[in-house]
Each structure stands twice: as structure tokens, then as C-alpha cells.
């Protein structure tokens, strides 16, 4: 019984982490869909979101719903800026040049924001604008933070799904992702669609940043690196370019990370994630939901 | 003897460099710190040469080169510890073995992951690099000597100017000879167009894994030299940022150019260490703000580097 309760508790913790990974993975998967680029800077935009939320809550006491709106706007702006300044001039360049540029943007954001006069390289305690309440559900405990995370993630996913599959913008995104040249011939504004996709994806990362701050209340300029890489792995696991794939991949990665920490060793958890990546890339490179022999 | 004929200019250059540097070190004009930095630059050049073979010549993008450098470093340090080696002649087989061990791991991991292309290969090598980092962090569970996240301490200082320059005098001409052999041409074919290479009857899978294995071999030897230069190893010395270092050297120097890698390595280490002297200590963090900007600018202006596909006469390559 003891073990069962422990397992259920760890499952909830894993879903909490997985939900945040899913939000970050969405940005990766959408950007990869339209641009065929692994946006290395995405994890750093997630970090930027957490810092914006920190300033809004701790320094200016902004009400919580507004925190979400302003943070999403801020990360979306940063995403648009990165796309316009760094990626757009390289649209016709070789794939690897674009990838190296993305790595450069990521390093720049980390080290620029870690300057003493900006965010400083120190760990900063993330404030919670509400008290933590634990709900005892028999075998396991659910905190109100977890309820918020699940609710916000769920709502974001539904909205995103509607955006991608039920609106004109979403149709344009899917068309560009399918074939950029043909989409342009059909009168779709390709550059505009790419920018729009960046904005939506980075806004999701912003939400992820706020939720991450609530769940693990310590933020740092380099906090985006590992969640960024793991979320990308989640996107690959689910099938890159697919919205539901990113969500499922995020949950699987979050759960496996928490289970390895809980039952094996917390220092080995990163190792398992990369073994998952290597296995997926070799056995089924198009991911769990991707069509076979689609890419790579 | 043909080897020496072809490599005579380069070996001669190494000898001249040896005399000059030796005078510099013995006379006391260069501090111990400067001596270490110069040796480090040469070590880094050997490892970068490995990445240039993999990426610059064969076009297989790797973000995990530091992992193979680290594997070589740990393997050699473990060997000198296990056999309590303390002299230069016994150190040479250790270096060779650490290179071979790195090559073995590289060859094994290359078999599956080299089927991937471009950005997926990048992510797979990045993942492998982080896996190695995690394993090194946990290495004290296997053997206490390896030190895990505390670091590997007490490695004898065996890397000297003689050994580093001897390694360069052998490895650079050997690399040059391989590059200008039929295999090297196959590699460059694959870089230009993999599909067309297959159509010509080149066994692309085998050629790619050959290039990858050889690149890892060079990284492993460089790792062994590094371990016995700084006498202390820590898993964080072999993380993602180190792989980026190698990548920058290859790109700055020029993809597909041995001369470029040598110049790129010297420029890079000179730049990094030079800024350490020039910038006040509070501003040191600014280095990593400007380096990425430089990288982005390079990608926009000269995506193939400064000296791409050209070689210095020192290497003794005739115009073909």
C-alpha cells in the first residue's frame, strides 16, 4: 500500500513536470514545423518568461491573470525579435548555418541576461502570490499549484488546438509546414505565418516559465538549458511538428524523469532522457505519432 | 619514407616552433601560465582537427565532440593511474590507447547515429554528449579513482612541449595524407552531395563512420594530452560549451582546411586568454556575450569560415 501511494504521488509530480515540458515542447514542434529549425534559444525564452513573471509579481505586485498576459506578450515579442534579427536573414542559408545561429542566439541570451546589471547570474527565489494549499485525496496529496498547472496547461492546449485546426491562421501554419513554396504560391503570407508561429510558440514558453517558477521556486539565467533540451526531446518523441505529439512526449519525459529520480537515482535521470532520445531517433525517428519514413 | 618526404615542411616547421618555444620557456620570458596556455592551444588544435574531419570534410554535424575528448582524457588518466606511469616514453602508448578507446566508442555510437542527418544528428550527438557528462558525474560509483562530480585528481604532469609537438608533427601530416587519399575524397564527396556519392558507388555509411571514428581518435589523443597538462579533470570541462569551442575553431578557421584549424585554434585560445588579461575581472563575463554575436555574424557573412578549402604551403600539398 505504501508503495502504491508513493507511486501515485510520484505520478502526479511527474505529470506536473511533464505539463511544463509539454508547453515548452509545443514551441519547438511548431517552429520546427514551419521553419525546419531546432530553435535552441527556445529554452532561454522560457527562462526569460520566468524572469518577467518574477519582476511582475515581486516588484510590481501585478494581479495573477495580468501576469500571464504580460509575460506571454513579452516572450512573444522576444521570439519575434529573435526571428527577425537572427533567423530571417538566413532563410535560404544551409540548415546547419541556421542551427549554429540558433546556438549562438541561445548563448547570447544566457550570457547577456546573466550580466550583473541585468538579471545577474545568481539564483533568485520566485515569489508565490498565493498560499500553498494541499488537498488530501486519500493515497496522494495534490497542491493548488498542481491544480493551477494542470488547469492552465489544459486550457492552453485546447486553445492552441483550436487555433491550429480551426482557424485560418492555423490552416496557413499547417500549409507552410507542409510545403513552404506551394503555400507561397497559394497566396499565403509565408513570412507572416512564420512570425506568427514564433509568437505563439514563445508565448507558450512564457506560460511554461511562470508555471515552472510556481512549481520549482528558484530561477536562474541558465535554468532554461536542461528543460529546453528535454522538451525538444519530448517533441521528437511525440513526433516533431505534431501538437498532440509534443504534449504526450512532454508527459512521458516528465514522468520518466520523476520516476528515475524517485526509484533509481536523481543524478542518473538526465542519462535516461538521452537514452530515450537515442532509442527514438534510431528506432522510430518520426516519433510515436509521426508517419513512418516521413523525415530524416 | 614517402611519409617524411611529404611531411618534411611541416615537421621542419614543428622543429622551428619547438626551438622558438623552448627558448621562450627556458629563458623565462614566458611565465608558467603562458607556457600552459600555449600547450593548451596546441592540444585544442588536435581535437578541433578531429571535428574538422567529421564536420568540415565529411559534413556530419556534431555537437558532442567534447564527449570524445573527455572519454580520451578520462581513459588516459585512468591508465596512468592504474599502471602508475610517470615517464614520457611510457606515456606515448597511453596516448595512443586513449585515442583508440575514444575511436572505439565513436565508431560504436557512430554506427547507428550517423544514419541521421543535419539537425537530427546534431541533437543525437548533443544527447550523447550529455549522456557522457552524466556518466562521468556518476563515475565514482564504478571506480572511486574517477572521482565522479568531485573530479579526477592527482594525474601526473606528463604533457610537455616535446610530446605535444611530436603528436602534432605526426598527426597533422597523417590527417593531411588521409584527406588527400581516396578516402578523403570520398568524405568530401559525401559532404557535397550524399545522394550523388551513393550513386557513384561510394559506401557512404562506411565512409561516414570511418571519418567519425578517425575524428574521435584525434579527440581522444587530445584529451589524453589535456588530462596530463592540467593534472585535474572535471566532468564540467567536457560539456556542451566545450563542444561549441571546437565548433567555433573549425568554423572560424574554415571548414575543410587543416591550416584553417591550426590558425583558428591559435586565434581562439589567444582571444579567450588575451581577453582575460585585457579585460578587468568584472568585465570577464562579457566575453561570452560577444562570442555568440561574433558566431552569428560569421554565419551571416562567411558561413564556411575564413580559410575554407585552402591550405598553407607548409603542409606540402601540391596544387592539383
Image (cartoon, coloured by chain):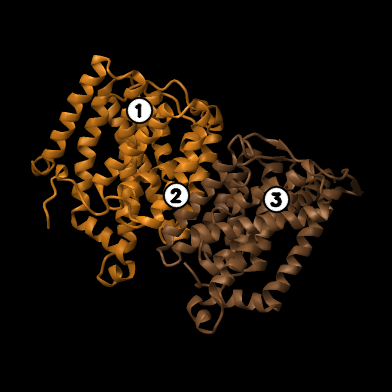
Q: Is residue A203 left or right of residue B245?
A: right
The first of marks 1 and 2 along the sequence is 1
Label 1 to label 2: alpha-carbon separation? 24 Å
Q: Tag 3: Cα neighbours inside 10 Å, few (<14), some, or many (≥20)?
A: many
The total number of labels drawn is 3
* Residue B248 at least partly seen: yes
Which chain is painted in orange? B
Which chain's residue wears label 3?
Answer: A
Q: Quadrant of residue B261?
A: top left
Residue occupied by mark 2: B63
Q: Tag 1: Cα neighbours inside 10 Å, few (<14), some, or many (≥20)?
A: some
* Residue B64 at least partly seen: no
The spot of residue A150 in percent (x, y) is: 79, 57
The spot of residue A201 in percent (x, y) is: 64, 62
Labels 1 and 2 positioned on one and the same chain:
yes
Q: Is residue B281 left or right of residue B16?
A: right
Residue occupied by mark 3: A209
Residue B281 sits above or below residue B101 on the image:
above
The spot of residue A193 in percent (x, y) is: 59, 72
What hue does chain A carry in this figure? brown
Label 2 to label 3: alpha-carbon separation? 26 Å
Name, please, the residue furthest toward the top.
Answer: B27
Which chain's residue wears label 2?
Answer: B
Q: Which mark is residue B37?
A: 1
Q: Is residue B183 left or right of residue A8?
A: left
The spot of residue A143 in percent (x, y) is: 85, 48
Label 3 to label 1: alpha-carbon separation? 40 Å
Q: Quadrant of residue B208?
A: bottom left
SS at badge 3: helix
Q: Nearer the viewer, residue B184 or A93?
A: A93
Residue at the spot 33% in from the left edge and 70% down from the top edge: B195
Residue at the spot 49% in from the left edge and 60% down from the top edge: A87
Amino acid at each position: 500500500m505504501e508503495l502504491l501511494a508513493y507511486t501515485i504521488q510520484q505520478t502526479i509530480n511527474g505529470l506536473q513536470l511533464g505539463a511544463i515540458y509539454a508547453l515548452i515542447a509545443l514551441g519547438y514542434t511548431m517552429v520546427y514545423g514551419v521553419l525546419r529549425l531546432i530553435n535552441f534559444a527556445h529554452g532561454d525564452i522560457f527562462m526569460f518568461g520566468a524572469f518577467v513573471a518574477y519582476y511582475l509579481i515581486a516588484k510590481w505586485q501585478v494581479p495573477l491573470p495580468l501576469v500571464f498576459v504580460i509575460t506571454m506578450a513579452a516572450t512573444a515579442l522576444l521570439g519575434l525579435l529573435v526571428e527577425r534579427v537572427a533567423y530571417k536573414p538566413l532563410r535560404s542559408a544551409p540548415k546547419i548555418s541556421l542551427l549554429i545561429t540558433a546556438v549562438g542566439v541561445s548563448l547570447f541570451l544566457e550570457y547577456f541576461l546573466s550580466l550583473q546589471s541585468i538579471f545577474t547570474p545568481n539564483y533568485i527565489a520566485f515569489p508565490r502570490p498565493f498560499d500553498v494549499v494541499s488537498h488530501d485525496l486519500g493515497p496522494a496529496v495534490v497542491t493548488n499549484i498542481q491544480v493551477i498547472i494542470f488547469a492552465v496547461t489544459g486550457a492552453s492546449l485546447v486553445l492552441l488546438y483550436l487555433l491550429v485546426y480551426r482557424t485560418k491562421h492555423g490552416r496557413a501554419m499547417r500549409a507552410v509546414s507542409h510545403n513552404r513554396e506551394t503555400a507561397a504560391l497559394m497566396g499565403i503570407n509565408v513570412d507572416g505565418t512564420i512570425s506568427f508561429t514564433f509568437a505563439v510558440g514563445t508565448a507558450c514558453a512564457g506560460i511554461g516559465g511562470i508555471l515552472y517558477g510556481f512549481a520549482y521556486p528558484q530561477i536562474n539565467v541558465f535554468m532554461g538549458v536542461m528543460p529546453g533540451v528535454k522538451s525538444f526531446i519530448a517533441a521528437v518523441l511525440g513526433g516533431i511538428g505534431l501538437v498532440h505529439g509534443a504534449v504526450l512526449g512532454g508527459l512521458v519525459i516528465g514522468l520518466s524523469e520523476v520516476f528515475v529520480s524517485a526509484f533509481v537515482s536523481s543524478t542518473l535521470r538526465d542519462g535516461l532522457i538521452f537514452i530515450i532520445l537515442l532509442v527514438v531517433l534510431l528506432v522510430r525517428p518520426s516519433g510515436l505519432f509521426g508517419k513512418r519514413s516521413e523525415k530524416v | 619514407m614517402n611519409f617524411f618526404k611529404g611531411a618534411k615542411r611541416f615537421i621542419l616547421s614543428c622543429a622551428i616552433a619547438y626551438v622558438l618555444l623552448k627558448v621562450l620557456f627556458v629563458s623565462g620570458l614566458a611565465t608558467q601560465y603562458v607556457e600552459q596556455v600555449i600547450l593548451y592551444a596546441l592540444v585544442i588544435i588536435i581535437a578541433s582537427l578531429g571535428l574538422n574531419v567529421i564536420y568540415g570534410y565529411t559534413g556530419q554535424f556534431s555537437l558532442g565532440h567534447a564527449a570524445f575528448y573527455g572519454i580520451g582524457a578520462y581513459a588516459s588518466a585512468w591508465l596512468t593511474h592504474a599502471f602508475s606511469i610517470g615517464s614520457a616514453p611510457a606515456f606515448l602508448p597511453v596516448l595512443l590507447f586513449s585515442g583508440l578507446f575514444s575511436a572505439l566508442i565513436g565508431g560504436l555510437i557512430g554506427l547507428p547515429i550517423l544514419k541521421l542527418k543535419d539537425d537530427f544528428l546534431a541533437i543525437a550527438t548533443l544527447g550523447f554528449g550529455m549522456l557522457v557528462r552524466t556518466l562521468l558525474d556518476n563515475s565514482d560509483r564504478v571506480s572511486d579513482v574517477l572521482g565522479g562530480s568531485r573530479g579526477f585528481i592527482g594525474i601526473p604532469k606528463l604533457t610537455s612541449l616535446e610530446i605535444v609537438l611530436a603528436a602534432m608533427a605526426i598527426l597533422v601530416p597523417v590527417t593531411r595524407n588521409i584527406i588527400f587519399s581516396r578516402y578523403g575524397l570520398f568524405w568530401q564527396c559525401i559532404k557535397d552531395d550524399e545522394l550523388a556519392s551513393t550513386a557513384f558507388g561510394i559506401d557512404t555509411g562506411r565512409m561516414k563512420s570511418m571519418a567519425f571514428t578517425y575524428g574521435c581518435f584525434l579527440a581522444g589523443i587530445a584529451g589524453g594530452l589535456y588530462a596530463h597538462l592540467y593534472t585535474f579533470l572535471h566532468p564540467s570541462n567536457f560539456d556542451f560549451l566545450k563542444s561549441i569551442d571546437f565548433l567555433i575553431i573549425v568554423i572560424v578557421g574554415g571548414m575543410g582546411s587543416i591550416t584553417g584549424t591550426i590558425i583558428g585554434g591559435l586565434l581562439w585560445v589567444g582571444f579567450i586568454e588575451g581577453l582575460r588579461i585585457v579585460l578587468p575581472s568584472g568585465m570577464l563575463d562579457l566575453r561570452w556575450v560577444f562570442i555568440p554575436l561574433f558566431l552569428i555574424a560569421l554565419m551571416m557573412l562567411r558561413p564556411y569560415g575564413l580559410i575554407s578549402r585552402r591550405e598553407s604551403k607548409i603542409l606540402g600539398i601540391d596544387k592539383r
